[in-house]
Amino acid sequence: MFDNMHDDNANPMTPEQVRSPRWAIVLLVAVTIAGTWLRLWNLGRHSLWLDEAWLANTLLSDSLSDVVFLGPGSAAPNSTPFLLSLAIHALTRILGDSEFVLRLVPALFSAGSVVTIWLLARRLGATTFTALFAAILIAFNPVSIEYAKELKQYAGDTFWIPLFLVAVSRFVDKPTWPFAVVLAFGTLIAFGFAQTIALALPGACFYMAIHAVLRLRSTSAEENPRALLTRSVVVIGIWLAGISAIYLLILRHQSSERLVAFWDEFFPSSASPGVLAPYAIGHIVGFFKWFFGWLNETLPNVRNNTGESLIAWNKIVIGFAAIGALRLAITRPLQLLTLVLMPGIVALTLSTQRMFPFGAVRVNLFMLPFTILLVAFSADAVCGALGVLRNLKSSASPAKGPWQARAARGIPPMLLGALAIALALPRIEKERSDPKAREELRPLVARLLDDYRKDDAVVLIDKHTEHAFKYYTRNAPVDYKILKSAWSDTVLLKSFANAAKHHRRIWIPVTHFNRGRIEEILNLLAGRWPNLAVVDQRDAILAFFDNGPRPVRVPPSDFDIVFPNGEDRAALATDGDPTTHWMSSSPREPGWQILIELKTPTRLDSIVLNTPIWPDDWSHELYAQVQTEDNDIWSSSGLSVWEGPRTTIRFEEIDAPIRRIRLTNAQQDPKFHWSIHELEIWSQSDMKKDATKSVVAP
């Protein structure tokens, strides 16, 4: 078995590659299709996040200059590779500007990395088994899949870097003029999609230079020993001229001191050995923890009493990578140094000098193909060692029969197929359940547009919210009021008060803040405007208030409440103390009802159910029905329920006095109870009761 897995490339030092067996090509195609499917699945499901949103607005511009250079602000230009920006811009003109289309190019590049890493592994002398192992690892790697679904340049690095190194290796083997031209100008095109190719250029130049010198000193009767040297000089000259031109025309306008300063916290300030060594070691360990952390949840493990894993598989992988590096050091030392290790060394060194201001994530994604290659080559080394041991033990045994040989040849594809299935299943389950926990803006935007009126104002409190909401309302006539970037609570309240002087209805979206800050903003606004309504998506909210006549709070003594259970805590929901609460005696069940009866039928403005401390202890599917003064039938028309820990149910469109209210929970949750810290009932003010319909009409 191990002979079959190791010996299909019997002399790894020769550059010529043995043709891969048909089963290997079939399996590679199947893995590539599966990897592509996982990257396209749910590609447009989730809302654009901060960086994606401002880039989307830039890419949808009618000005090509803005597409290339316009960033989230005047001090932070667009640092996205210019050809990637133009390619996505062109694609949106053909297929539309949905999230799926915007993310399609990065997703396809990520899917293509399955093939390019296979090609690079083969150029490094990998066996068919090892090359397929590398392809499978990147096809189903969670980090690769996650970043493939983002409108960013990161996924392109994993495609273009291996392809570039394959082309360099191929050129050294056969330095023809046509291929020299393709390599020279193809690299410049690739640089327009993945600027990190610049980090691999020094290693590629060293690789070509060393081979050129070896050819000159060779005593073999080569047709033209100077061909590689002269053509390498031409290729490197075109690289230098092309990248210099790109820098002068584009890149120097895509960088700024603010952009560099933004990433300062991620990098040390010195490249001295005492600083660079721990920095590099920490990053290398971090690469493996990030890229292979999923192994701790996938592979069998031993856990302690607290449920923590005792076997750190992601750290064990570092040992396998060391074995893979040793394998390459023995068989391909020059390629290991120049094509595999040197790009990472250059990246880490330049980042210490602020010469690579793309952030830790960009450096990490750039290293993904190299870490996977080293891990894959460990399998090559292990299988080779086991094959040698097997040959030693069986040297005195009779030769294998034909059926035994056929059975042995079938084991590698079966093992690789089983590995691919084992790695794919967790990713499929992840995509089926919740592929990424991120605030969802589309429900908030849909709620805004459904109820937005001509004279409404939408107040954006920061650039994060501005970029996202402007993308999702790009085809709607929404009036935005934008606060300055630096604001305090006092400025916030004053700005809303100023907006209220000119607009009766005010909308306040809040996104990309941590949950604690969102709660602070909500409490601040609710203290000033008690009829505040909120749509809550956990990490993003949409608050709304009507600046018309203020509602009046109905005293708890004027109504009775019946809870589905937990009656001993019922009084805590209306005691005026937000630190106490009613809580159900068991996790939420569908069909639970809260019944409210007013002692005197009243025209209501809203009901507020506030659960500020435990945000998950609120009904995520709540339906409200009412009985009016002269009607015993429960209303079936949908009422406006603003969901979230601060759930507001609005009744302003109901003119008749309301006698009873029924709130029905439709959600089952095996973990969380139903809590209400304060239940507030607000009636319409006297001014609002007597107002004509024209006052509140759109």
Image: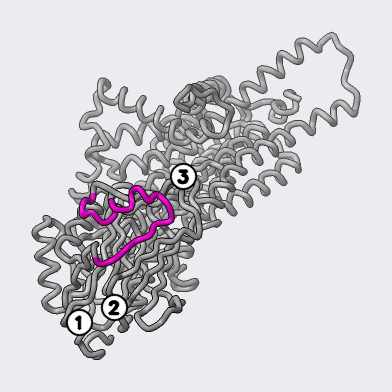
Q: Which residue is label 3 attached to?
A: 671
Seen in the picture, residue 640 relative to 262 is either above or below; the reply is: below
Image vertical order of residue 512 relative to residue 457, above or below: above
Q: Which residue is mark 1?
A: 688
Q: Which residues are magenta?
A: 558-578
Q: What amino acid is found at the position of numbered circle 1 in the picture? A: Lys
Sequence-wise, which precedes: disc 1 or disc 2?
Answer: 2
Q: Find numbered disc 2 in the image and state the secondary structure of the residue it sits on.
A: loop
Q: Nearer the viewer, residue 300 or 371?
A: 300
Q: Are marks 1 and 2 in contact (CB under 8 Å)?
A: yes
Residue 504 lies left or right of residue 11; in this view the side is left
For the point 33% across and 49% down, which residue is it?
569
Q: Earlier in the sequence, mark 2 or mark 3?
A: 2
Question: Can you say which quadrant of the picture contains the N terminus?
Answer: top right
Q: Quadrant of residue 559?
A: bottom left
Reading the image, the residue beneath label 2 is 652
Residue 507, x across and y down, in percent: 24, 70
Q: Above or below — where is 95 with respect to 564?
A: below
Is 148 placed left or right of 277 in the picture?
Answer: right
Rate crowding at label 1 as few (under 14), some (14 to 19) or many (20 or more) other CA atoms within 10 Å.
some
Amino acid type at image mark 3? Lys
Q: Quadrant of residue 265?
A: top left
Residue at 59% across, 54% down:
37
314 or 209, nearer to the observer: 314
